[in-house]
C-alpha cells in the first residue's frame, strides 16, 4: 500500500515535548504526523503555540503535519447563541492554524455528553455549516470523530448530520476501533457514511466492551485489510493516522512495528 498517506498521532507522547514525538515518529519511518490538539503539542492561544515554528520543527525531522486533532466545535450545542458564536471563532482559528501548518484536516467535536443526542443536530448543524463555509475557503476538511454516544456512536446520526451540514468540507473522522469498543459494527458504519469520510484513525483492539483493550495491529478483532481495501474502493483520498494506545510496548518500538505491518500489507 502507499505509505505516503500514513501518519502517526503524537498521542502516545502527550506528556512530552512535541519534538520528542517528532524524533520518534520520524525514526519509525513515517513521513506525516497527526498532532494531538492540546498542550504541549498544540494550542489555540497564539502566545502558547506558533504554527510556523511547529511546521518548521516538523519539517526539520522530515515530517509533514497531516491533521490537527483539535477539540473545537463542542460548544455548538449550547442554548446560548453567544457561546455558539464564540465556538465558531475557535473553529475558525483552528482552521487558520491548519492552513498555516499545511495540514489537510482538523478534528471537530459534536459536543459534551449533554449535547450528544441526535435531537441537537438541528441546533449544531447551522454552525458547523458556517464553519464549513470558512473551511472551504482554506481547503481544510473537518471531521467529527466517532467516539461513541448518541451522535458519533450512531452511523445514521453521523450521516444525518453530514447531510444537514451539506458541505464536502465537513464529514466523519472514521475510527473503526472506537466503534468496535462501543459495540457498533464498524464495517456497516463505513458503508453508511462512506461518502463523508474526511480522515481516518487506525488501531486494533478486542471487541468485548467490558474488557476492551487496544492491541498491536493484527492481534485484535479489527480487519485492517478489509478497511483499507474498502477505503480504496470508495475512492477515499485522505490520510490514515495510526493512533498508538498500546500499554505493553513503548511507542518508540511499537510504532515501528505498526509502520512495518502496514508496509507489508498488500491491499
Image (spheres, rainbow, N blue to C red):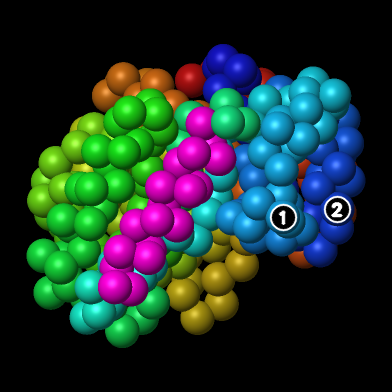
Task: Give residue 80's position: percent from left, percent from top.
Answer: 25, 79
State yes or no: discs 1 and 2 in contact (Cβ < 8 Å): no
Q: Of the two numbered discs 1 and 2 on the same chain, state the one appearing first in sequence.
A: 2
Alpha-carbon span between mark 1 and mark 2: 17 Å
Determine whether, in the image, residue 141 is placed left or right of residue 104.
Answer: left
Observer-nearest residue: 18 or 173?
18
Q: Main secondary structure of the magenta part?
A: helix
Answer left or right for 81 relative to 138. left
Residue at the image position 17 percent from the left and 72 percent from the top: 120
Q: Is residue 3 visible?
A: yes
Describe residue 15's horizontal placement relative to residue 42 as left or right: right
Left or right: 160 with respect to 190?
A: left
Question: In the rendering, which numbered label is found on residue 262?
Answer: none
Residue behind mark 1: 47
Task: Report if residue 260 is visible in the image.
Answer: no
In front: label 1 or label 2: 1
**Mark 2 closeness class: few <14, some 14–19, many ≥20 residues within 10 Å:** few
Tell me the SS state at disc 2.
Answer: loop
User: Is residue 232 part of the magenta span, yes or no?
Assistant: no
Which residue is drawn at the image coordinates 30% and 47% (left, top)? Answer: 131
Pointer 2 residue: 17
Q: Position of residue 221 (x, y in %)?
A: 50, 53
Which residues fall within the magenta stretch? 82-99
> Mark 1 falls on what kind of element?
loop
Amino acid at each position: 500500500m502507499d505509505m505516503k498517506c500514513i501518519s502517526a498521532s503524537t498521542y502516545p507522547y502527550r506528556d512530552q515535548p512535541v519534538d520528542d514525538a517528532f524524533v520518534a515518529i520520524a525514526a519509525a519511518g513515517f513521513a506525516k504526523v497527526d498532532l494531538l490538539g492540546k498542550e504541549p503539542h498544540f494550542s489555540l492561544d497564539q502566545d502558547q503555540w506558533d504554527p510556523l515554528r511547529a511546521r518548521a520543527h516538523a519539517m526539520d525531522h522530515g515530517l509533514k503535519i497531516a491533521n490537527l486533532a483539535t477539540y473545537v466545535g463542542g460548544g455548538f450545542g449550547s442554548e446560548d447563541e453567544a457561546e455558539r458564536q464564540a465556538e465558531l471563532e475557535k473553529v475558525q482559528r483552528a482552521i487558520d492554524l491548519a492552513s498555516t501548518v499545511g495540514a489537510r484536516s482538523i478534528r471537530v467535536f459534536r459536543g459534551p455528553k449533554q449535547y450528544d443526542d441526535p435531537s441537537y443536530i438541528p441546533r449544531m448543524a447551522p454552525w458547523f455549516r458556517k464553519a464549513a463555509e470558512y473551511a472551504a475557503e482554506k481547503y481544510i476538511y473537518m471531521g467529527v470523530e466517532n467516539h461513541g454516544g448518541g451522535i458519533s456512536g450512531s452511523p445514521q446520526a453521523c450521516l444525518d448530520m453530514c447531510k444537514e451540514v451539506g458541505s464536502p468540507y465537513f464529514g466523519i473522522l472514521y475510527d473503526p476501533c472506537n466503534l468496535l469498543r462501543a459495540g457498533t459494527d464498524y464495517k456497516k458504519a463505513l458503508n453508511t457514511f462512506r461518502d463523508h469520510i474526511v480522515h481516518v484513525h487506525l488501531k486494533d483492539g478486542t471487541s468485548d466492551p467490558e474488557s476492551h483493550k487496544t492491541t498491536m495491529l493484527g492481534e485484535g478483532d479489527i480487519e485492517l485489510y478489509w478497511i483499507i481495501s474498502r477505503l480504496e474502493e470508495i475512492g477515499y483520498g485522505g490520510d490514515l493516522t495510526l493512533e498508538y494506545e498500546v500499554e505493553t510496548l513503548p511507542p518508540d518500538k511499537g510504532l515501528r512495528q505498526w509502520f512495518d505491518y502496514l508496509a507489508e500489507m498488500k491491499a
